[in-house]
Image: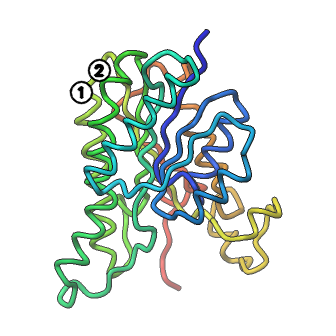
Amino acid sequence: MTTPLAIITGGAQGIGRATVELLLTEGWRVAALDRDPEAVAELDEAHASAPLLAMAVDVSDELQVQEAFTHINGWQQEHGKADGFDLLVNNAGLADPECGPLETLALADWRRWQESHLTGAFLCTRAAIPGLRQRHGAIVNIASTRALQSEPHCESYAAAKGGLLAMTHALAVSLGPEIRVNAICPGWIETGPWQKAAKRTHPEHRDIDRAQHPVGRVGEPQDVAATVAFLASDKAGFITGQHISVDGGMTRKMIYAE
């Protein structure tokens, strides 16, 4: 049986890194793309003996994406592996959701959000489609609950994540039945340094922070990684074109100001 191969963007930090590490433990080979060279080097060092290819790549840059996929294909051939990909996770994008008041937002800043999330997902998906078709693979786009609900001054981020949801169902129709495409909408996912200590409760989280979530806690990157792994598996073989909120139930809870 061919060892499955996943390509994960934004793979050296936060949700992306948790997904890389989970898939490695489950026997996958992983290519991790991230624009932060220091984070890439740290990830590579931490998993020096693993079947991991970690690369510093800006996924909004067409040439860099082309070169990255050429490198991935070469990596496969060097290790005598079959061609094709089993999973693409479009996770890269500016993490800060707040862009400030729209009337003062510079066009260049608006474009930065769209380029990092939407254009990056487009470029990586376009490059991955031939390989995914070979293995009847899957695509998972990491959107956000902010595509479904908002706080003030988050228009750039919300538009980019909403675009990912629309692209998800469009791709599912266009690429099926060979390729399944789904999205995950994370809510509050804590990606701070506390994760390295494997603690379940962030010392800075207030009781109200935990209590506002129906599950009683703030989310962890591993919560999203586990959902990615499920959507990539045969167990999700009848699921495509959908978005799944991984938010501890927050988008289903009505909140009124007291």
What crowding class fits label 2: few (fewer than 14 Cα within 10 Å), some (14-19), or many (20 or more)?
A: some
x, y percentage for residue 88? 44, 36
Residue at image location 68% in from the left, 56% down from the top: 215
Secondary-structure class at tag 1: helix
Q: Which residue is mark 1?
A: 173
CB atoms of marks 2 and 1 within 8 Å: yes
Spatial distance from mark 2 to mark 1, Cα to Cα?
6 Å
User: Which of the 4 quarters of the picture holds residue 238?
Assistant: top left
Relative image position of residue 87 (x, y in whole percent): 47, 31
Q: In which quadrant of the rendered view does residue 170 lie? A: top left
Q: Residue at x 20, y 90 (%)?
A: 104
Residue in the image at 52% along x and 33% along y: 6
- The numbered disc on residue 176 is 2
What SS does tag 2 mark? loop
Which quarter of the image is occupied by the N terminus?
A: top right
Image location (x, y in percent) of residue 58: 38, 58
- Front-most of 229 and 135? 135
Q: Nearer the viewer, residue 257 or 55?
A: 55
**Residue at the image position 33 percent from the left and 47 percent from the top:** 65
- Image-based side of 133 in relation to 53, left or right: left
Amino acid at the residue labelled 2:
Gly
Q: Is residue 119 above or below residue 73?
A: below
Residue 126 occupies which quadrant of the picture? Answer: top left
**As shown in the figure, which amino acid type bears the numbered disc 1?**
Val
Q: Nearer the viewer, residue 14 or 243?
A: 14
